[in-house]
Every structure is written in structure tokens, then in C-alpha cells.
Amino acid sequence: MRRRTIGILVLILVAALSVGAHVGSSDVFFEGDAGPYRLYVTVRVPQVIPGIAEIQVRSASNDVERIEIVPMRLSGAGSNFPPTPDVAERSKQDSQFFTGSLWLMESGALKVRVAVEGSKGKGELAVPVPAFAQRTLPMERSLGGLLGFLMVFLAVGLVFIAGAASREGNLEPGETPSPTKTRRARIVMAITAVVVLGILFLGKAWWGAEATSYKRGVNFFKPPEAETQLENGKRLVIRAKGQDAEWSKEVKMEDVIPDHNHLMHLFLISAPGMERMWHLHPERAEGSVFVDDLPNMPAGHYEVFGDIVDKDGFPWTLVGQVDLPQINGEPLGGDDSTWTGAPLAAEAPDGSVAQLADGGRIVWNKGTAPLVANTAMVFKFIVEDKDGKPAKDMEPYMGMAGHAEFVSSDMTVFAHIHPAGSASMAALELANGAPKGNEAMTDQNAVPVGMPMSMPTPASPEVSFPYGFPKAGEYRIFVQVKRAGQVETGVFDAHVL
């Protein structure tokens, strides 16, 4: 931190790496309609704030002529007063692909507004973007050495310049400085040296304070800890604890807003094999905690992931671990679901078919190309009945065609994805003009309004999810749909290069 004053500013200009917005997966993926135009939007979130976000937009049709992009606050002051937009550049190789770069100047819940013009007129949509600094970047040794040399050179030069000005500033040409002027010059040089050292000391102290504040900001946005406690043999109590002391003052559990019908989406995944998964929906209780009466569960070690959305539309995933005894609970009901199967292999086979409990199956239309990290993709699935025909009994699952969870084998990546992408429904509502979740949904079980997506009638057996793996490795993908009132889960293992 001692030599980062200029270096961190330089690195901010070039930093565009991605770290987690979900857990370990920060890039934002979105599929939706801007008026008559179907768009696939990827926002590569910068690693540091302020920083440059890379925006990629692909149109499903070739009739788009111009795309403008602009960052804004998701809600509150500034959410309706955009700055001058930037024009995305059309690819010379692909006329349906546009790219652009935007400065994200502040942390928090932001959105990127995308305005489209084409042969069908104009259209617009907004993509929520959780913006936050993930790390402080070290300075290169060569740059630090150069800046250190320049600092010493300028400081010493300033001392000598002050001495020369005092000693020789009013001499006539050819005149030699008197002993008095020489002594005075030495005194001025000493005083100047003290002043310069004082300025350097104060500058170091100021930068240290700024660095500490920046580091606290990094810690503030790290995934909060899910502190768990088992009561009465089956009642799981969940408390959120931020990695910074100020987190609990800013993010209050009593202010979280509903996200596709529930205040929290809790995932319990057995570790290390991921052979069991539960998708549950705890209720909020007094004391800023969430509680859930667990269903029947075998004893074991479980990874805990709890999705919530704060009042400003910023998504948080609580992360923890819990060792549970045998749980003798009640049968699952409502939107809760579970899956049990084979553990994830050391090198996961790229299977494309998942069998369902009723004899049906989910087929992954994955193609033949290998899965590559840091590449935006659309994961397409089709649900079939036991006769191998497209299912005709599909229903909305919490207001959408399906849900998917992408989990890496080491549990460092967890992403809860919807057909519209990686943004939460609550944030999408705010980004596209709907009231805050608690205002739009006084009934926690009501279906939210304002989403830029809809379920066809009758519901299609096809469901897709835009996403990109953040790193190479082995992954397990849980695809969840609802058929004839029953939630079904298909599981696919994937090897990512």
C-alpha cells in the first residue's frame, strides 16, 4: 500500500477482470426484449471501482441499426437522470453483435440501460448490475521503483532549488554569494526539507486511510456468512453476518425484498460429492433471522447458500457450512424441492440427458463444441414425458419457466440463474420501472409484476438460461422445472476448459 498512489490509478484504467457477484461469478448475463428486439446482453463487471465494464450485446435478428448504452443507479436519486449514452460499436465480422465500454464510478446496485433503434422502431431495456470492488491490485515492482525514484528526485530537487533561490536569487552577474547568504540558504534548505518530509508523511497517512477505507469496501461486498443453528432437532435458524462490521448496519434482514415470490432462497448441497441438494424457502422471524423447518434429511456435511435481495435491489448470497444429524421432518410442499443421485466424478462426464422421477427426462441441447470458461452461452433444455415426447404439463415455477443452479466442484462458484439471466427478479423489476419488492408485493406469495419476461400459454417444454462459466473445472448444473404441480430436478455434470 505504500507506493500505490499513482499505480492503483493506472491499474484501475486497465482492470476489467471478473470476480463474484454471485459466489465466484460476477459477470451479468441477460436475455430479454427491448421492444420488438430480442437481445442477449453480457456485462463484464470490472474488478475495481471506479473501473471499466465491458458490454456485449447480441441481437437475435439482423434489423438492429444502433445501440446506445448508459450506466445509471438502479433506484433512488439518479435512476431517472442518465448521463450522455455511449454508442456501442457494431462488429465488422458479425452485424448482430455490438460491444462497448462504460465507466462504473460507484459501488452498489446499478443498471445498464440499453436503447435500440432499427427497422421496427425503438426499444429499451435495463440490466441490473451489482457493482463492487473485489480486491486491491498490487503495483508492479518496476513501476513502483520508477515512482519511488521520481519521488526522491523531486523531493531532493525541491530542497536544492529552495536553497539556490535563497542564496543566489538576487546576485548580480559574476557576484559570489556571501557567507551570510550561504548560511541563510542552508537554513532555508533545512526548513524546506522538513516541510517536504512533512508533506510526504501526511500524504502517506492520507493514502493509508484511503487504502484502509477501500479495503473495508472490498470486505463489505464479500459474500456474508450464513451462521446456522439447529433447534428442536429440525428447525434451522439462519443469521447473516457480513465480513465488515458496517454490513449489518447497512443491510438489514427486515428490509430485504421478495425475489420471485420468496424473501430467501436457501440451497443445501451435500459436500463434497453434491449427491444431494435441497432448494428451500425459509421465512423471516423476529430478531432479523430466517427459519425453516427442515424436511427429512440424512446426516451429513452441507454447503449453505442463501440468496436474498436488499431494499436497494443489490443481491447477496449468504455462504456457510453446516453438519446436520438425521432430520426427521415433514414432507416437502409448495415451492420446496430436493434431488438425490450419484456424486460428482473427479472428471465430470458431459452428459446431456437427466432422468426424472416420473420416467420423463430433461435433455440438454448442448451441441458438440466444448464448454469454455469466460464465454457467454445460452443453455437450452427440453423437458420430455415418459414416452419421449415434449412435456405438455409444464407450469410456471415461481413465476418463470425454470431455475438453474451452476455449482463448481470446489464450491467456490455458485450461481442461481433464471431464463432472463443471472439478475434477480426483484432487481429486474426495479431496473425496469416496477416499485420496490415490498411495495409491489404486500403478499409474499403473490407473483411479482413488472418482469420483462413471460410464460407462454400453454407453457413450453423448452427452457433456456444465459450464463458463462467463470473458470475452468468440473461443474454440476441443477435444472428445475414444474410439471403438473410437482417440482422436478434434472442434473447435468459438465467439464469446462
Image (tube, rainbow, N blue to C red):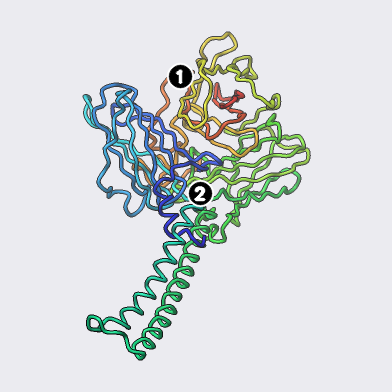
Task: Indicate which disc residue 134 carries.
Answer: 2
In the rendering, at what x and y percent does residue 209 appear?
A: 49, 66
User: Which is nearer the N-term, disc 1 or disc 2?
Assistant: 2
Q: Is residue 1 above or below residue 35?
A: below
Amino acid carrying mark 2 in the image: Gln
Q: CA distance from mark 1 to mark 2?
A: 39 Å
Most foreground residue, 226 or 45? 45
Q: Is residue 145 left or right of residue 169?
A: right
Whether residue 491 is visible, yes or no, is no
In this rendering, which labeled residue sits more in front, label 1 or label 2? Answer: 2
The residue that mark 1 highlights is 460
In the rendering, at what x and y percent does residue 65 appear?
A: 24, 28
Residue name at image x 56 percent, y 18 percent: 362
Most foreground residue, 301 or 467? 467
Task: Indicate which disc residue 74 carries.
Answer: none
Q: Is residue 353 above or below residue 165?
A: above
Q: Residues within 10 Å of mark 2 (few under 14, many from 20)?
A: many
Whether residue 457 is visible, yes or no, is yes
Asked which secondary structure carries label 2, the reply is loop
Residue name at image x 58 percent, y 8 percent: 387
Mark 1 touches mark 2? (CB < 8 Å): no
The part of the image, by quadrant, that contains residue 53 is top left
Residue projecting furthest to the front: 174
Amino acid carrying mark 1 in the image: Ser
In the rendering, at what x and y percent does residue 19 appear?
A: 51, 43
Total numbered labels placed on residues in the image: 2
In the rendering, at what x and y percent does residue 215 appear?
A: 52, 57
Asked which secondary structure carries label 1, the reply is loop
Q: Residues within 10 Å of mark 1 (few under 14, many from 20)?
A: some
Residue name at image x 51 percent, y 27 percent: 402
